[in-house]
Image: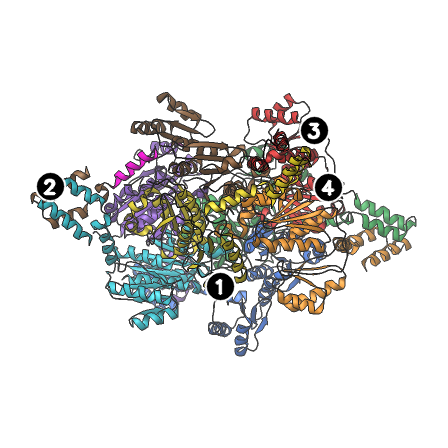
Chain colours: A green, B cyan, C purple, D blue, E brown, F yellow, G red, H orange
Amino acid sequence: MDAQRIRELLAAVRDGSVEVEEAVSALRAMPFEDLGFAKVDHHRGLRCGFPEVIYCEGKSIEQLVSIVEARVAGGGNVLATRASAEMFEAVRRRFPAAVHNPVARTITIAQAQSPGGGGTIAIVSAGTSDMPVAEEARETAEIMGQKTQTFYDVGVAGIHRLLAYSSALQSASVVVVVAGMEGALASVVGGLVDCPVIAVPTSIGYGASFHGLAALLAMLNSCASGVAVVNIDNGFSAGYLAAQINRRTKPQ
Amino acid sequence: MDAQRIRELLAAVRDGSVEVEEAVSALRAMPFEDLGFAKVDHHRGLRCGFPEVIYCEGKSIEQLVSIVEARVAGGGNVLATRASAEMFEAVRRRFPAAVHNPVARTITIAQAQSPGGGGTIAIVSAGTSDMPVAEEARETAEIMGQKTQTFYDVGVAGIHRLLAYSSALQSASVVVVVAGMEGALASVVGGLVDCPVIAVPTSIGYGASFHGLAALLAMLNSCASGVAVVNIDNGFSAGYLAAQINRRTKPQ
Amino acid sequence: MDAQRIRELLAAVRDGSVEVEEAVSALRAMPFEDLGFAKVDHHRGLRCGFPEVIYCEGKSIEQLVSIVEARVAGGGNVLATRASAEMFEAVRRRFPAAVHNPVARTITIAQAQSPGGGGTIAIVSAGTSDMPVAEEARETAEIMGQKTQTFYDVGVAGIHRLLAYSSALQSASVVVVVAGMEGALASVVGGLVDCPVIAVPTSIGYGASFHGLAALLAMLNSCASGVAVVNIDNGFSAGYLAAQINRRTKPQ
Amino acid sequence: MDAQRIRELLAAVRDGSVEVEEAVSALRAMPFEDLGFAKVDHHRGLRCGFPEVIYCEGKSIEQLVSIVEARVAGGGNVLATRASAEMFEAVRRRFPAAVHNPVARTITIAQAQSPGGGGTIAIVSAGTSDMPVAEEARETAEIMGQKTQTFYDVGVAGIHRLLAYSSALQSASVVVVVAGMEGALASVVGGLVDCPVIAVPTSIGYGASFHGLAALLAMLNSCASGVAVVNIDNGFSAGYLAAQINRRTKPQ
Amino acid sequence: MDAQRIRELLAAVRDGSVEVEEAVSALRAMPFEDLGFAKVDHHRGLRCGFPEVIYCEGKSIEQLVSIVEARVAGGGNVLATRASAEMFEAVRRRFPAAVHNPVARTITIAQAQSPGGGGTIAIVSAGTSDMPVAEEARETAEIMGQKTQTFYDVGVAGIHRLLAYSSALQSASVVVVVAGMEGALASVVGGLVDCPVIAVPTSIGYGASFHGLAALLAMLNSCASGVAVVNIDNGFSAGYLAAQINRRTKPQ
Amino acid sequence: MDAQRIRELLAAVRDGSVEVEEAVSALRAMPFEDLGFAKVDHHRGLRCGFPEVIYCEGKSIEQLVSIVEARVAGGGNVLATRASAEMFEAVRRRFPAAVHNPVARTITIAQAQSPGGGGTIAIVSAGTSDMPVAEEARETAEIMGQKTQTFYDVGVAGIHRLLAYSSALQSASVVVVVAGMEGALASVVGGLVDCPVIAVPTSIGYGASFHGLAALLAMLNSCASGVAVVNIDNGFSAGYLAAQINRRTKPQ
Amino acid sequence: MDAQRIRELLAAVRDGSVEVEEAVSALRAMPFEDLGFAKVDHHRGLRCGFPEVIYCEGKSIEQLVSIVEARVAGGGNVLATRASAEMFEAVRRRFPAAVHNPVARTITIAQAQSPGGGGTIAIVSAGTSDMPVAEEARETAEIMGQKTQTFYDVGVAGIHRLLAYSSALQSASVVVVVAGMEGALASVVGGLVDCPVIAVPTSIGYGASFHGLAALLAMLNSCASGVAVVNIDNGFSAGYLAAQINRRTKPQ
Amino acid sequence: MDAQRIRELLAAVRDGSVEVEEAVSALRAMPFEDLGFAKVDHHRGLRCGFPEVIYCEGKSIEQLVSIVEARVAGGGNVLATRASAEMFEAVRRRFPAAVHNPVARTITIAQAQSPGGGGTIAIVSAGTSDMPVAEEARETAEIMGQKTQTFYDVGVAGIHRLLAYSSALQSASVVVVVAGMEGALASVVGGLVDCPVIAVPTSIGYGASFHGLAALLAMLNSCASGVAVVNIDNGFSAGYLAAQINRRTKPQ
C-alpha cells in the first residue's frame, strides 16, 4: 500500500536513517496518487452512493458477473445499464437481492444507504416509446438515494395532458425531460418550471429524426432558459446529474 | 400566333389542299405549346391572383422596376419580396399605388380582386425576431385575397400566452407557424387545432441552430399530426400555400 | 367526473352553502382540464374520424390487440400503420371486419361515417418502390372519409407519363407527391397544379440519397410555389394533412 | 379583470339569475388564463430575480432603451446580453446605475436583492478566447444573486494548471466549463468534481471545429458522469442554469 | 389510338361536319401525349439498346422473372442489376441464354445488336473491393454494345501501377474511375487523360469514409478538369453514361 | 532542353565516348520528365485548345496580367474565370483583343483555332439567377472550339417552357444542365434526351438549400440514367467536360 | 527485362544501326516504369518489413489463405487485420507459426527481422471498449519490429490514473492515443509529452458520438500541439505510422 | 516555495514535533503541483525551443506586443501566426530583429539555438493557393531548428510534376503535404515515400469542398499507409509535429 510506503519513509526520517533532502526527493519521485490523491476519488464514490456504473452492452455474461462481484464486495450500491434478461438471470443466481427493471434494462443491487436530498426529481416523457430511457434515468436517481416522481406520455401534441401536472412539476427540485421526435417537450416544461431541466433526446422517430439528432438540436436550442442537454438515449447520465443536483438541494 | 397556324392548317384540310395524313404529321411536328398548353398556365395566373412573385435579392433597381412594369401591365396583383427601402422608393416613384411593409420587406401593388376563401388564415410566431418571416407570409396571403389574423410572440417558453388564443386558433381554416430556435411552437399548435398547419423554420438562434436546421428538423418530426414544413425563412411559400388552402375552403 | 365537481360547486353557491369568493378560489385550484378543456380534444377526435393512429413498430401483438380493442370500443374508425401480416392475423381473429393492405402495411376497421370533403385527393408516386408510402397515405385519407385517386410510377425521368395525367391532377383539391431519389416529382407536379401539394420524401435510393435526405432537401427547395413537406417515409402524415385540407374544401 | 367576470357569474348563480348548467358552459368557454394561470408566471419572475433577459443583437438602440425602461419600471434586475459599447452609452445616459462588462458584452442594472444560494458557482474556461462566453455566464449568475469564482485559461493542454485548482473546484456547488476547440476540459473537470457540470461549447477553433460543433459533440459524449451541455457560445444559458441550481443548494 | 382520334377530327374538318374553330378547341383539349410524344420515348429505347434497367433489390423472384419476361418479349437486351445467385437460377430456368456475373451481381440477356461507338471505354478501379461496382459498369456498357478495357487494382498508393497503363488509358474515348476511401484515383487519372472521366465513389472504407461520402466529395472537388461524378456505388449509371458518350464517338 | 541532353548522351554513345552501361545509368538518374513524358502534357494542351484555366479569385491584377501574358506568349487560347470588371480593364489595356462576358465573369482571348466536334452542346438553366454559371460553361466550351446553344429560364415549375424545346434538346450531342434550389431540371432533361447530361448544382436558394447541397444531392440521385455531376457553381468544369465529349462526337 | 531493351537500343546506337533521333523517339515511347521505377517500390517493401497488410473483412477463408501463402512465400512478415477466429484456424492449419490476437483480431506470422528504432511506442487507451483498436496498433508496430508499452483504461474522467504514468509517457518516442466518446485523452496526453501523438478515434459511444465523429472532430481540434489523427477505428494505420517514426528515432 | 513546506514538515517529523500519521495527512492535503510537477512543463518549453505559439487573430496590436515582450524576455524563440502587416510593423518597431513572412503571415524572432534533427522535412503543396498554409508549416519547423525543403505547386492533376521529385521526397525524414480541393496529393505522396506523412487539408475549393471538409475526409481515408491528418488550414500544427519527429531522427 502506498500510504504504507510514505509511512515507512516518514518513520525513517524520524529515526534519522533518512535525511530530509533525501526524503523530499523520494516523495517527488513517487507517482502522486501514492500521496493519497486517489483517496479523493474513493471518497467521492462513497459520497455518491456508487463509484461507476456498469454498461452491459458488449460485455459477456461472465465478465458482467465478475464485475458485479467486485462491486458488491466494495460495499456500495450496484447499477448495471443496458442489461438483457439473460444477464439478469445470471446475476440473480449469484446475488438473489438483485432487482431487474426490464423496461429500463437495468439491474440494481442496493447495499448502502445514500443520503437523499431535500427535493423530488420529476421525470417527464413524451411518449411510451421514450419509457426505456426515462426508466433508466429513474433507476439511476433512485439507486443514488433520491426521490423521484414520473409523468409519462405527456407529449406536447396534447398539451392539456402536460398542463394538468403543472403544479406537480413546479414543486420538483429538478426535472428530467425525455423526448424523441422534435423534442419540444423540453421547451414547454422549461417554460413551466423555474428549476433546472435536464433534457434527454431519444432516437425515436421517422427518417428525418436522424436517430435523435432532431431532438438533440431542438433541446440545445430551447427557447426556455434553464435547460441543459445530455447525450441521445442517455437516461443514466440524466438521472445521475439530477441526483447530483437534488442531493444538495435544501428542504423547502 | 400559333393558334393561327393551326387554323390555317385546318382550313387547308377543309379546302382539300392538305391531306389528312399530311396534317397529322404537321401537327405532331409543332411544339406543343403552340396548341394552347401555355394557356392553361395563363389561366392559372388569373385564378391565383398573380402569376409569380418577384424575389428582389440580387436584382438591380432598374431590373426590378422593369419587371414590376411588366407585371403591372399584365393586370394582376404584384408582390415583390426581400425588397429594400431604396427599391421601394424607386418603385413608388413609378407606381404611386405601391405599398411597402418594411418589416416583411415586401412591396405590393393591388390591381385585381382575388376571390377570398371561406375561412381565416392564422399566422402565429414565436418571437419578435421571427416577425419579418411571419409578415412576409401575411402579405403574401393578403395580396392573394385571403383574410388573415396574426398571433405574434407566443413562443412555448410561456405556454399560457399561446393557450390564451386557443379558441381563436381553433376557428382558423389553416395556421401558419413561424419559429426559429427549437421550433417547438409548430408541435404545440398542431396539437391544439384540427386544421392544416404550415410550419416555417427561421434562421434565428444561437450556434447549434445551424441557421435554422434545428427548427427545420424539429418541425419535420412534429409529434402532432397535420403539420407540413416549408423552407427556412420562406414566409412567402407558407403564405402562398395557406392562401391556396383557404381559397377553396367552404364557409363555416 | 370533473364537470360534475363544478356542478356541485355551483349548486353549493346557488344554495348559499359556499361563498362566491370561496368558489372562485376553488375553481382556480382545480386542474384546468377539469373545466372541460379535455373535452375539446374529445370533440376533435369525433370530428376527424379517429383520435390517434396506432404505430405498430416496436409493439407486441398483445399490446396491439388491446389498443385496438380500446379504440374499437371508443366507436371511431381505427387505423394501424407499419403492421405486419402476423399482426393483422391477430387483429382479424378478434375483429373480423379488420382490413389489411399489405403494401401499405396498414390495418383499418371502419365503424364511423366520416364527413367527406368537396374534392378529391390525388396521390402521385415516382416509382414502384415508393408505393408502400403512397398507399399508407391513401389508406389514411380514406379511413378519414376522403375520396382519393392514385397516379403511380409517373417519375420525371419519363415526363410524358406524368403529363398524360395533367388535367386529372389539375382537378384535384390537394395532391400528395411521394418520391425518393432526387424527389424532383414534387416540383414538376407543383408547377402543373394550383392546389396545395404535400410532398413525402422516401428513403429509396443509392448511397448519396442518405436514406431520404436528398429527396427531403430537394422538396424543401422546390422552385414551385405551394409545396410543403412532411417527414421521410411518413405517408400517414401526408394522408392526414391532405384529409384535413380536403374535408373543408367546398364542392367545385 | 377576469376574476371579476367569474365573481359576477357566481353571484348570478347565487342569485338564481343564471342556471347551474348555464354557468358550467360559461366557465368552459372562458380562456383558462382568466382563471389565474398567468399569475403563476408573474410569481416566477419575482422568484428568479428577473423575468427574461434582453438579447441585444438585431435590436436598434431605441428599441433597447425602451425595453430597458419597461424592465426597470417593473422593479426587477435587468440583464442585457450581446450589447455593444454604443448601446451601453445610450442606456447609461438614461440609467446612470447601468454597469457595462465589455468582455462579456453585458449591461446590468441591479435594483432587487436576489436570494443567494448556499454554495459557489465555479466558472472555468480553457483559453483567453473563451472569456467573453465565460464572463457572460458569470454576469448572469451574479445578477441572479449567486456567488461565483472564476478559473480562466486552464485548458487541458497544460493539465497541471487545472489540477492546481482541484480542491477549489471540488468545493463548488456547480461548475460551468467554457471551452472551444475539442472541448476536452468538460470531461476532465467532470472527472475531478462530484457536483453538476454545465458545459458550454464555444465557436473558437480552426476549420474542423465547424464553429463549435466539435466541442459540442465532445461535451455531449463526455466520459465523465454529471455533465450537461447548453448551446454553442450560450454563456447566458449556462449562468442561468447554474444560478437555478445554486439558489436551491443547502449551505455546506 | 390517339393519332386515330386526330385523323377522325381532321376528316370531319375536311368533310365540313366540324368547323375549323371547333377543331382548334378540340385539339387543345387533347392530352398532348396523344399527339405522338410518347413515340419519341419508344424510339429512344430502340436506339439505346434497352429501355430501362431492372434493379433487383427488394423484388421477389416471381416479380423479377415476370419483368424479365416482358422485357424479353419486347425484343431488346435485358440487364438486371443487384441480382442474387438465387435470382439468376430462376431467370436461367426460364431463359437459358441468361448470363450471370456474380461479381457484378448482374444478369444479362443479349437479343439485339447495339451499334458500337468508335472508341473504347476504360474502366479503372482502385482496389479489389471496388470490383463489384466496376464490373457493374462494364456489364452495363457491354450490353449497350460498347467495347471496354479494364484496369483493376491500380490505386494511387502505388502510383507506378497506374502509370504503367498511361498510354493505354490515353487511347480510351472515356474513362470510368471506381474508387472508395479517399477517391484520389479520379484526380490522378483525370490529369493523365484528355477524354471525359466518369467517377464512381464506392462505399468502401474505414469509419470516416462515411459510407462513400469522403470519396464522393473528393471526386466532386477533383483538381483535374473533365471529371464528373455519379452516385455512390452506382456502377450502372457510370457504365450507361460512358456508353452514351462512346456510342457517338467518331473512330480515331 | 532535356531532349537535347538525351541527344548528347546518345551521340556520346555513338561516338564511343560513353559506354552503354554508363548510359543506362545516366538515363535512369534523369528525372523522367526529361525523357519526354512532359511532352504528352504539352501535346494535350495543344489538342484541347488551352492547357489550364486562370482562376482569378484571390489573385492581384498584376499577377493576373503577368499570367495572361505568359499564356498569350504560349500561343494558345486564354480563358480566365471569376474575373471582375476591373481585372478585365487591366487585361484589355495590355491585350485589346481580350473579350469580357460580365455575366459569366470571364475574359477570353482567342488566338488558336480549336477543332470543333460533330455536334452541339445544349446549355440549359433553371432560372435567371443560374445564368452566371451557365454562361461560364458556355464561354468555356466555345473557347475550346465547340458549338453551343442555350436554353435559359426553363425551370421545371413551368414544365411546358422546357418541353417546348424537347426536339432541340434531343438533337444535342451533350447537355449541360445548370440549376439551384432542388435541381430537378437535371432529372427531367435526363429523361427527355438520350445523350450525356452534365449537371451543375448552383448555390441559389433559401436556407435549406445549404449553399447548393440540396441541388447537388438531388442531381447525384437523379432517377434518369445518363446524368453526371460536377461541383457546385462550377460552370467551367461542366463546359470543359462537355467540350471534351463533343470534340470526339462524330457528325450526325 | 526493360533495362535490357534500353541496353539493346543503346548498343544499336553505338553500332550506328539506329540513328540518334530515332533512339530519342524510341526512349520516349517506352513506359517509364520500364526504366526501373517499380524497383523502388520493391525496395520499399523490404525496408519496411512487409509490403502491405491483409484486410480480412469481406474476404473468404480460401481467399485469405491463398493471399497469406503468397506473402509467406515472399519471405516478409505477415499481418492480417480484422480476422475472425475461424479465419485464424484455417491459417494456422496451413502455417502453424501463425499467431492470433483475438482482441486485436489480428493474425501475424513473423519470418523476417525488422530493424527496431531507438525508442519505445506508448499505446494509450481510454476505456476497455477501445482495446481492440489499441491492440491492433500494438500488433502492427510490433510486427514491424518496434518496441511498445501499453497504458490501457486511463480515460480522462479519472485523470489521476493517467497522471500516474506521466513520466513513463514522457520517455516514449511516439504515443498512440486510442479513445472514443469525446476523445479528450488525445489533448491531455498531447499536453503531457513533447513527442508526436497519433490519435485514433474509435466508434465507441452513445448516440451523439455518431459512430466516432465526435472523437474524430475533437482530436482534429486538439488544443495541444503535436497531435495528428488517423481514421476512425484504424489501429493499423496508427501503429504503422508510429513504427515509421520510431524506426528512424535515434537512441536516447 | 512548496518544496520548502515539505522540508519543514519533514524536519518536524525528524524532530518528533509532528507524528508520522499527522505528516501523512498533511502531505495528502497539499496540492500536488506543489511537489514540483509544474517544473516538468518548464523543462518541456526549454527542450522544444519555445513554449507556445502566439495566435494573432482576434488580438489587438497592444496585446500582441506585450505578449511578444514577455516571450522575448523568457529568452526562447518567438513565433506568431496569422499576423497582419500592421501587426508586424508594431512588433518590429519594438524588436528590430523580428522577421515577417507575409505569405505565411508569421512573425519570428530567433534568440535561441534549437537542436536540429538528423533529417530534412519536405513540405509539399498542391497549388499556389495552398502556399500560405505550407509556408506557415515551414516557418514553424524552421524556428524550431529543423531543416526544410519545399516542393510547391505539384498537384496530382499533373502527376509528372510530382514524380519528378520522387527521389528528393524519398530522402526526407518526414513529409508535410498541404492540399485543398480533393486532397489527393496526400495519398499519392504517401505511396511514394516510406517516412511519416503529415497531411494538412486547406479550405481552398469550389462549393462542395465545404471549406476544407472534402480534403479533410479524403486525407483521413488515405489508401496509403503512414498518413496522419491535422486540422484544416493548420500549417502550424503540421510544422510543429514534423519538427518533433525530425528532432529525434538519427542522421542517415
Query: Tag 4: residue type?
Result: Arg
Q: Distance between the residues labelled 1 and 3?
A: 67 Å
Q: Over which residues does the magenta segment extend?
A: E37-58
Is label 3 in contact with label 4 (beta carbons under 8 Å)?
no
Checking the image for residue E11, the label placed there is 2
Chain holding disc 3: G
Chain holding disc 2: E
Checking the image for residue G110, the label placed there is 3
Q: Mark 4 points at which residue?
A: G248
Q: Name the residue under label 1.
A: F90
- Element at badge 1? helix
Query: Tag 1: residue type?
Result: Ala
Query: Tag 2: residue type?
Result: Ala
Q: In which quarter of the image is residue H4?
A: bottom right
Q: Which residue is drawn at 21% across and 41% down?
A: E34
Is label 3 in contact with label 2 (beta carbons under 8 Å)?
no
Query: Tag 3: residue type?
Result: Ala
Q: How far apart are marks 2 and 1 (CA)?
A: 68 Å
Q: How busy is the neighbourhood of tag 2: few (under 14 within 10 Å), some, or many (20 plus)? A: some
